[in-house]
Amino acid sequence: MASITRLLRVAAQGLLWHATITSASQPQPRADVSACKLAANSDVYLSAGFGYEFNCAPSTGTLRAFMLFIDFSDQQADETAQSLHDFFLPAAADWFATASYGALSLNVTADTSGGFHRMPDTAVSYGFARGLTFEAHQKYIQDALLAYGATIPPTDVLYVIPTANAADIAFSPTFNSNVTTHDGVFVAKKAVTIGVDAFMDWGYLTLNHETGHTMCMPDYYPLDGGPTGQYIGGWDLMGLISGPSPDFFAWDKWRLGWLKDEQVECVAAKGSTTHTLTPLEKAGGAKAVVVKHSSTNALVAEYRTANALDAASCATGVLLYVVSTTVATGEGPVRVLDVTPDSGGCADDELNDAPLSLKGTDTFTFADWGVTVTILEESADEAKIKVDVL
Ligand SMILES: [Zn+2]
């Protein structure tokens, strides 16, 4: 697969450490944390680095959203708009509040008073399927604004919610461009158009996944049609929405401003270091060790436990993954390292039991980069690890 070849090429080029010379008397490869803030690559769509500029919706403070409800002459609503609002909220807002440790408030204004607004065209005519063009998606959103008719207050993201009877609105893409009316009036930075897959398959977390895209988060499942868990198993909501451990990776929580710099420890040179991590799912403490490999690649260690958003985790411990800022959305910008290959996994995915654990595999070497991570202690409150970089 081309993307894997590309990653390996990047890895091969990446042996230039931003190194400080270490010796037995000066074993301090731990670096200033800014050294590990890999910059986004503006040529790579939704690059998983810092500072990606794409008119992204805010990921800290308040994200203002407006929700409106539509139906079609051929696929009419027989439920209430309020019932669909309640399908998503407050659960989706609570999810972001927990994942962000209170840094992000999803503030949704929903107009349920007018019920469903009838779209000018039939549901089938919108051609909603994978491969939906930008123009067709834009027309759908603009028709929804026309159907709604009223002025929308200043907002970051527009949510267009169809009746659950709209079988032809089959999936839930994000419109990653300025939203305007047919007359060209600015409405929002981005739009999320929910499809019936949310109601049938994925639940309210569909709104969180798509809102993640409005904040410029990439897809972590393969967009070329490979197995959904191919790159990260069920470890992050931007992969398999129904995965057992949907909390966001610490790498992204850091990028999004949900983790402070002092909660991340950076290793940017050869040597041996020890680190204590606290559970990703609980606020406070150190959440990630980032081992910088190059200006575009890093290995990250974080402690995942069966708490809060990850309550359904089927394996816990120190999760390892590699990040590449040169790999685009859907091509594997984050790849979980499986310390128990060929175990059969759990919860239907080989990668779901990937973490290091004293209960299982306690050390792992990522030979490509000469990085070994060993778990030394593991309790409900913290995990201690040793990182060795050759
Ligand atoms: Zn997505």
Image (spheres, rainbow, N blue to C red):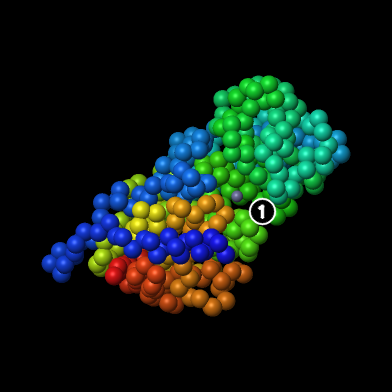
| Residue 189 quadrant | top right
36 or 159, nearer to the observer: 36
Pointer 1 residue = 202
Element carrying mark 1 = helix
Left or right of 295: which side holds 332? Answer: right
Residue at the spot 71% in from the left edge and 49% down from the top edge: 130
Crowding at dot 1, Cα within 10 Å, few <14 / some 14-19 / many 20+, comes out as: some
Residue type at mark 1? Trp
Residue 82 x %, y %: 71, 37
16 or 196, nearer to the observer: 16
239 or 106, nearer to the observer: 239
Residue at the spot 39% in from the left edge and 47% down from the top edge: 39
Mark 1 lies within 8 Å of ligand 1 (Cβ measured): no
Residue at the spot 36% in from the left edge and 67% down from the top edge: 369
Residue 253 x %, y %: 44, 49
Residue 321 x %, y %: 44, 63
